[in-house]
Image (cartoon, rainbow, N blue to C red):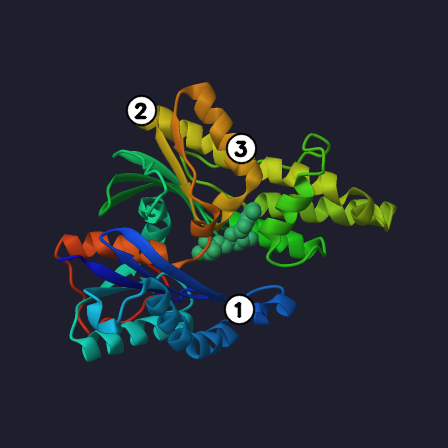
Amino acid sequence: MADIILGIESSCDDTSAAVIRDGYLLSNVIASQDVHRSFGGVVPELASRAHELNIVPVVSEALSRAGVKASDLTAIAFTRGPGLLGSLLVGTSFAKAMGLALDIPIVMVNHLQGHILAGFVKQEGVPVRQPSFPYICLLVSGGNSQIVRVDDPLHFEILGQTIDDAVGEAFDKCSKMMGLGYPGGPIIDKFAKQGDPLRFKFAKPNVPGLDYSFSGIKTSLLYFVRDEIAKDPDFMEKNKEDICASFQKALIDILMDKLVKAVKQTGIREVAIGGGVSANSGLRNRISEEGKKRGWNTYLPEFKFTTDNAAMIAIAGYYHYLAGERTSLDVAPVSRMADF
Ligand code: KG4
């Protein structure tokens, strides 16, 4: 009999539900929350309230688009953490209630494992191209920046991670600082395409091993913009494309330096990326170019699987389900999950 998994994701500001059958995607519905835009960042209380409003229609829509009834489901996979506690509580409580009502198992998923495994969601009519194990995943999102060794869908080792801000945070905070808007990543990416990446230079961090730091470059940009605006109040408007291109290049250089080091250290040449920042066009191009130059096999997720979505939670949950894992109904969400 087929295994039909409902995935539920509510860790931040996207309410999402997806259905997969034996690893193949049947539906993936995402309700994004525009309510945060005017605040320049996610407001946790507003996010929880929007999840509460969205969760029932989003799950109903996912089932209907998949053409399955709730009674057809084999199990429910849900994001337990990391994320905003109030947001996670909505998805977790919903999964528990639905699992109890249907008398089917629930399976908790680490949101970061979901991002890492997003490329394993199979789609009817789309050729399957997945990394072979072990592989290295550069996980880059609004909350995390990590280099992870993936030995199989259930075993992960963090080789390096940020010691302060995540790279997505650097994109978002710097965009806000420059008055360009929120979320910053896609906006900076768009302007960067029209700018000169070699025009301005920003301070690079000096962090040992495979760890990252992105707080210094943020400060470097802040002082640079402040000093230039003092000389010419229109500096930002006149130069935003070049600033974005140069800033984005600096972030990508930082990411790539450690990724290259990780590949050298481990000898693993299967390299994937995941997380919201993996939608960045500059990063995608650089990974592909470096891969060709250095003889890596590189794997870029489809855009729809880069930002938060329940398809990645469903596929991660599917592997846990196949391994016999079941989550007890007394499980509570957690905002931080230190390790895998
Ligand atoms: O994975 P995600 O949806 O949420 C977290 O789990 O954090 O990632 C959101 C992050 C935001 O910081 C957003 O600015 C960034 O992904 N992002 C991008 C791009 N699209 C989204 N960053 C750079 N370039 C993009 N095109």
Residue pictured at 33% horizontal, 68% vertical: 63
Q: Of residues 103 and 108, which is closer to you in this image?
A: 103
Instruction: Give the vertical position of 61 relative to 295 (above or below).
Output: below
Q: Residues within 10 Å of mark 1 (few under 14, many from 20)?
A: some
Q: Quadrant of residue 156?
A: top left
Drawn side of residue 196 relative to residue 40, left or right: right
First-in-chain label (1 vs 3): 1
Q: Which residue is mark 2?
A: 267
Drawn side of residue 105 relative to residue 192, left or right: left
Q: Which residue is mark 3?
A: 285
Ligand 1 within 8 angstroms of badge 3 C-beta: no
Q: Are marks 3 and 2 in contact (CB under 8 Å)?
A: no
Q: Residues within 10 Å of mark 3 (few under 14, many from 20)?
A: few
Amino acid bearing label 1: Gln
Amino acid bearing label 2: Gly
Badge 2 element = loop
Q: Of residues 307 and 209, which is closer to you in this image?
A: 307
**What x and y, as percent, mark residue 243?**
71, 41
Q: Of residues 40 and 55, which is closer to you in this image?
A: 55
Q: Quadrant of residue 209?
A: top left
